[in-house]
Image: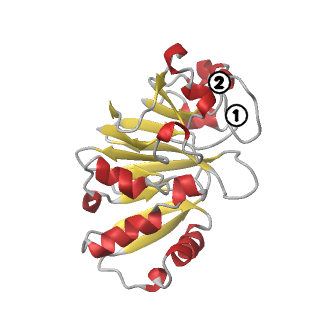
Amino acid sequence: MKLQIIGCGDALGSGGRFNTCFHVTGERVNFLIDCGASSLLALKKFGIDRQAIDLVLITHFHGDHFAGLPFLLLDAQFTRRTRPLVVAGPRGTPERLTQVMEALYEHSSKTQQRFALSVIELEPQQVREFGGVRVTPFPVIHGESGGPFLAYRIEAEGRTICYSADTEWTATLIPAARHADLFICEAYYYDRVVKNHLSLKTLEQHLGELAPKKLVLTHMSDDMLGRLDQLSHTAASDGMVIEL
């Protein structure tokens, strides 16, 4: 199984990076984690077969994590997709998806697709299974609007991936990430502590509790991108492939 980083940037385009999107493939699984506004462009740049994707997991409704869905669905319609697709995200996902589709392309939410589209709401700490993908959502903290906000612990083909999503430090990250084969975690700032985002230094204070087998830092601001040569952890980059 492998994960390719399609986009690891923040909402402000720091470092010229694409918005958040991760593509996971294995012998029996093929899914995305988040689909930010630039994700269709990035998927095409990296030669990803969109028709083969079975599932899109959304962590929250901010545009750099969610706003690529209308483009992905429009692309699926015009390329005559027939394979079923599941979109799963926090409570309110069906309504939010309709709203953003109508805001960007009038009447698009009412168009009859050639493929079966299922839009599913996930509740914190309620395990759901999608084919060979087992998903446990955990609540995280990222402000008042654009939520609910979820981190995911994802189990597939004998491997465990955790993605923190955007969040300040919260103890729910411990069960979400503990002993994961791969923990992809926001490190927005190096040592600056702010509400709703996580700094690398704060994360490092808890790594002993988390004990992931591999840590990859993502969603970095210019503050972090200017220190890449000083980091002792793996920093995400667009197009990076991680074997699991």
Q: Is residue 132 visible?
A: no
In this view, the mark in front (2 or 1): 2
Disc 1 residue type (three-letter): Trp
User: In this image, 38 relative to 147: left or right?
Assistant: left
Of residue 177 and residue 202, the one placed in the foreground of this image is: 202
State the image coordinates of residue 236 (x, y, percent, origin top left).
Answer: 45, 31
Of residue 91 and residue 75, the one placed in the foreground of this image is: 75
Question: Counting other residues with Cα less than 10 Å from the Cα at mark 2, is it few (<14), some (14-19), or many (20 or more)?
Answer: many
Residue 84 against residue 181 in the figure, above or below? below
Helix, strand or loop for disc 2: loop
Tell me the residue at 47%/50% (across/down).
Answer: 135
**Marking on residue 169:** 1
Q: Is residue 85 visible?
A: yes
Which image quarter is the N terminus in? Answer: top left
Which residue, given by chain and number where applicable, does mark 2 sit on? 190
Helix, strand or loop for disc 1: loop
Of residue 212 and residue 144, the one placed in the foreground of this image is: 144
Of residue 33 and residue 176, the one placed in the foreground of this image is: 33
Tag 1 or tag 2, which sits nearer the N-term?
1
